[in-house]
Amino acid sequence: MKVYVLGGAQTDFERNWTKEGKGIVAILKEVVNDGFKAANFSFKELERLNKDNKVACFVGNFIAEQYINQGHLGAFLTEVNPAFYGVPSARYEAACASGSVALEAAIARIKAGDIDVAVVVGFELMKTVDSKVGGDILGRAAFYEKEGKGIDFPFPKLFGRLADSILEKYPSLDKTRFLDALAKISYINYSNAKRNPNAQTKKWFMSLDQAKARGTDTNPFVGGKLAVSDCSQVTDGAALVILVSENYKKEHKLDLNVVVKGYGHRNAPLQFGKKIEENKDSKYVLPWTRQAVVDAYKVANLSVDDIDVFETHDCFTSSEYAAISAFGITEPGKEYEAVEKGVIAFDGAKPINPSGGLIGCGHPVGASGVRMLLDLYKQVSNQAGNYQVKDCKNALMLNIGGSATTNYVYILGRDE
């Protein structure tokens, strides 16, 4: 059973919903209304499908209990429109990969023939607290008692350890060359974001020299070798996609040509130190991330040579750096070559994050996986506007949760 993307939408990640005096109902109403309109899907159609028990909703969110004091998030779609009354809906959580686990559940239900249409929403409202409290909340995506509790901004420190681990794993890698590659990754993502009207940093400025100037007043260190320029953003935002079955496409004579071709899901050890122990017998610094990619290629019967666009989880520049070899763009330890040669640039042979990624576009934690899949859809369907990559036939996303603990990979492509 093939699964097609009907369409979707995301909110403008530049916005601060708390300052606007708006909350969960407002953000869900906006993304649902915009997503339904973009997909040419109506509330009447939702009601019709619900009568036949052929639709369900899947809500990705990490930790609204901490940010907005609210749980039972799947039920909130009933506050958007009465058409959601009676529609099965539940919340899915896997830290920063919460959107992807919601997608996995939706895809599985369609493939099993249980439903014909899945409405998948991811959202997070993060600007309700100050940065220090927010850092502590995010620490719960790690083993909080051992890696988060009592530590200021634990995740920059964890991904700073990833940068250290890369240098330790590949002793021939020149430190300056590595750090310059991280700076260029940041610069590329900020530059790409300027093309994206929904990107959080579309009005921000980051030069390559600024990104290289770690440890200065304008670019202070936040975790080991990582500085502010190496970090993704604290973001309010939501994204929605509607997935449909092959039967639904045929019955309604829909002209859809973007299909889910591949997927992979692997979990690494929860604690970062145990991840590093795990990689001793592998040439990859994050072997389970690599395995999720390999699994997706196998399901899709594709290879890195077939992928035209990548969206990756650049929560920090070190995570994007490690993803380059996980995708197969370079051999492990040689990731800097793809950065230096412009391979991953917007006009490169294997562009990564034309949307701006988490660093440029923004990272509302529960929404990122859904937003990535939406951007793959836009690229393959030639609807990405100013950040459209020419002739994109297949696109791949990597969405991770925690310190690369949960690893999700999806491949979308033209139905051929």
Image (tube, grey):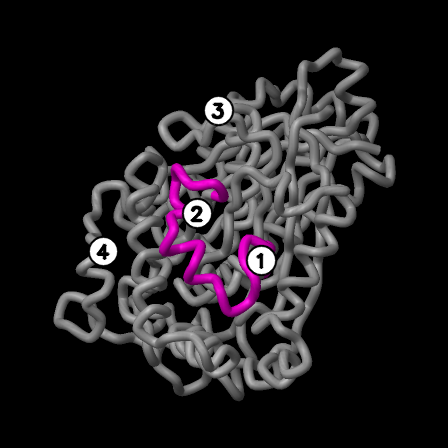
Q: Mark 4 points at which residue?
A: 208
Q: Earlier in the sequence, mark 4 or mark 2?
A: 4
Whether 254 is among the magenta residues is: no
Q: Distance between the residues labelled 3 and 4?
A: 29 Å
Mark seen at residue 343: 2
Main secondary structure type of the part rendered in magenta: loop
Question: Which image quarter is the N terminus in?
Answer: top right
Q: In this rendering, does residue 23 appear at all?
A: no
Mark 2: which secondary structure? loop
Q: Which amino acid type is shown beneath numbered disc 2?
A: Val
Image coords of residue 41 (percent x, y): 61, 21
Judged left or right of residue 175, residue 279 is right
Q: Mark 3 points at which residue?
A: 383
Q: Earlier in the sequence, mark 2 or mark 3?
A: 2
Image coords of residue 82 (percent x, y): 61, 30
Of badges 3 and 4, nearer the viewer stands 4
Of badges 1 and 2, nearer the viewer stands 2
Q: Which amino acid type is shown beneath numbered disc 4?
A: Leu
Mark 4: which secondary structure? helix
The quadrant holding residue 387 is top left
Residue at (59% x, 60% y) in the render? 326
Bounds of the magenta span?
Answer: 326-350
Whether 330 is among the magenta residues is: yes
Q: Is residue 98 above or below residue 387?
A: below
Q: How far apart are marks 4 and 2 (CA)?
A: 17 Å
Q: Mark 1 points at which residue?
A: 97
Q: Which of marks 1 and 2 is nearer the N terminus?
A: 1
The quadrant holding residue 45 is top right
